[in-house]
Amino acid sequence: MFNKYLEFIKNNKLKSIIIFIGLFIIYEYLSLPNNSIILLRTKNPTTTALMEIRKDEAEKSYKKFVKRNKWIPLKNVSVYLKNAIIVAEDGTFYRHEGVDWYEIEESIEAYVERDKPLRGASTITQQLAKNLYLSPSKNPLRKIKEWIITIRIEKLLSKKRILELYVNLIEWGNGIYGAEEASRIYFGKSASQLTREEAIRLAAAIPNPLRMNPHSTSKGYIRRVARLTQKMERAEY
């Protein structure tokens, strides 16, 4: 009897949270302006929410913040780097609509039942949404906003443009943003000239760019490079 009572509470708690999340999504979706995203079709951003956060963090620590970012058209980016990024970060990039709904369902259940932070497979579009407009916070409402913005981005921008924005704005070290700047700093060449191995090493650093870089010798990074190399081979890149 007691177990049934607990199950009833758990199920109703889950339903209540799902209803709340649903209403929050509807509110945020209707109130979020399209204009800023539509502008991204033709305008290259000069800054992002993440860049501003890094700048504020540096100022609070009395450190100098120098933003280094050089734009490069997607067509000029090495095909090795484009493929390595997709394999490393989002293998279904060209097939999904921005978010992995199965992963979100699993995330909500884990949040309700085990009090784990809301997560969700961070697709390339989700990462772009977070970098452009939000923060790295684990706050559940922040994560929901990320999902909403992601859906908007997918509806308003092409996959090609999404990838171009991502490649040019992603963080690759302290003050280093975008593939072109990262390629020049770490390898002394343009992102258009990257070799397969250099591209893999750059892509492998994406999850933790402030601790890992393409010249890192840490065991964790070396293992990640090896795994990504194997994935590239299996994907026939």
Image (spheres, rainbow, N blue to C red):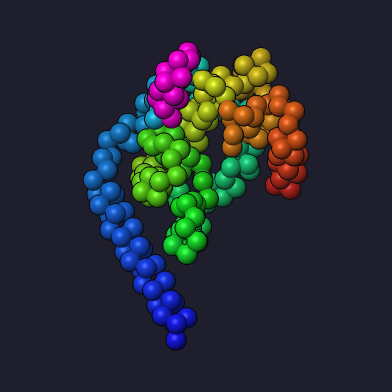
**Residue 80 point in image, percent of width and height:** 66, 32
76 left or right of 58? Answer: right
Q: Which residues are magenta?
A: 50-66
Residue at (59% x, 34% y) in the render: 208
Rendered position, 34 above or below 197: below
User: 226 or 156, which is in the foreground?
Assistant: 226
On whether residue 62 falls in the magenta region, the answer is yes
**Residue 150 point in image, percent of width and height:** 40, 45
229 left or right of 121? Answer: right
Rendered position, 227 above or below 14: above
Residue 152: quadrant of the picture: top left
Residue 11: quadrant of the picture: bottom left
Residue at (63% x, 32% y) in the render: 205
134 left or right of 236? Answer: left
User: 229 or 220, which is in the foreground?
Assistant: 220
Rendered position, 174 above or below 200: above
* Residue found at the very far front of the displayed protein: 2
Residue 155 can be seen in this image: no
**Residue 215 point in image, percent of width and height:** 71, 24
On whether residue 122 falls in the magenta region, the answer is no
User: 189 or 48, which is in the foreground?
Assistant: 48
